[in-house]
Image (cartoon, rainbow, N blue to C red):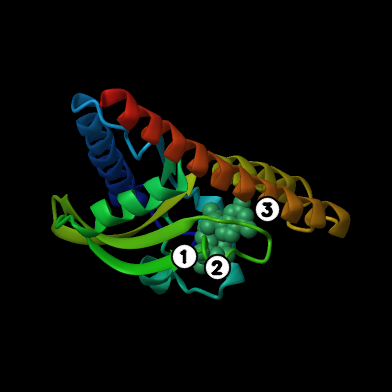
């Protein structure tokens, strides 16, 4: 793995991240043009750094020739939504598209992870045009609310700080914080309903 040309290997992944970002931003813009609430608040994307690819390949015992098929998150895009319902709107929109194929779905919203992590992951096979022809690239799309994103960002920092060994006391605090974040999402969904109801009354 030492002698491989990472720049060449990762180029199509960068292309996919950029293309997905453009397309998702296009979806957001269309809602804005129509003065409708956009289910997408913001979008971020990244190509997994080489050091992280190597670390994960080692941890998962993935050989050089299997990285492409077995590492699903080299290309990663994150869609952050205001409300939980928006996540499902985004999922439906992604499912109705014809420019990529969904190969796997991971619902960590109804089935949160042991850490307290919540998010909806969609793994897609995205065809990218290269000068050598079409290449199918796996990409991971993470869809989550602002509250879920806030939690995951902080938990990620702590994991980094403690090199994956977060002390039990902090771990249980994080689990409680995850529940608080979920409660916040639920409360906000209810307020949203109220606001839209008020809007309807006002229009009549
Ligand atoms: P890795 O966790 O990346 O080794 O892959 P996996 O095959 O186990 O997939 P999984 O669906 O568990 O996680 C994919 C990605 O979701 C991770 O790379 C993170 O970005 C995110 N994720 C999963 N679990 C957690 C978690 O407990 N905390 C945070 N902050 N992010 C998580
Ligand atoms: Mg994992």
Counting residues from the N terminus, which is met first, the one under dot 1 or under dot 3? Answer: 1
Direction from residue 167 to residue 76 in the image, left or right = left
Please tell me whether residue 19 is drawn above or below residue 201 in the rendered image. below
Q: Quadrant of residue 24?
A: top left
Within the image, what quadrant is residue 165 found in? bottom right
Taking depth in this image into account, of 80 and 77 the one nearest to the observer is: 80
Tag 2 secondary structure: loop
Label of residue 111 in the image:
2
In the rendering, at what x and y percent does residue 74 appear? 42, 55
**Quadrant location of the C terminus in the rendered image:** top left
Q: Quadrant of ligand 2?
A: bottom right
- Please report contact status of discs 1 and 2: CB closer than 8 Å, yes or no: yes
Mark 1, mark 3: which one is toward the viewer? 3
Q: Is residue 144 above or below residue 117?
A: above
| Residue 49: image location, x then y, percent | 50, 48
Neighbours of disc 1 within 10 Å: few (<14), some (14-19), many (20+): some
The residue tagged 3 is: 179
Say what secondary structure mark 1 lies in: strand
Residue that label 1 marks: 107
Work out whether 59 lies above or below 180.
below
């Amino acid at each position: 793995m030492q002698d491989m040309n990472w720049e060449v290997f990762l180029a199509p992944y960068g292309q996919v991240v950029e293309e997905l970002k453009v397309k998702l931003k296009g979806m957001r813009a269309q809602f804005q043009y129509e003065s409708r609430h956009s289910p997408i608040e913001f979008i971020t994307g990244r190509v997994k750094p080489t050091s992280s690819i190597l670390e994960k390949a080692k941890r998962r015992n993935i050989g050089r020739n299997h990285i492409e098929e077995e590492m699903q998150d080299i290309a990663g895009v994150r869609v952050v939504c205001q409300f939980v319902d928006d996540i499902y709107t985004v999922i439906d929109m992604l499912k109705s598209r014809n420019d990529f194929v969904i190969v796997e779905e991971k619902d960590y919203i109804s089935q949160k992870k042991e850490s307290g992590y919540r998010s909806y992951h969609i793994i897609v096979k995205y065809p990218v045009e290269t000068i050598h022809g079409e290449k199918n690239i796996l990409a991971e799309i993470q869809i989550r609310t602002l509250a879920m994103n806030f939690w995951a960002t902080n938990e990620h920092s702590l994991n980094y700080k403690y090199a994956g060994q977060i002390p039990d006391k902090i771990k249980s605090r994080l689990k409680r914080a995850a529940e608080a974040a979920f409660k916040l999402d639920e409360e906000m969904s209810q307020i949203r309903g109220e606001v839209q109801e008020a809007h309807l009354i006002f229009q009549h």
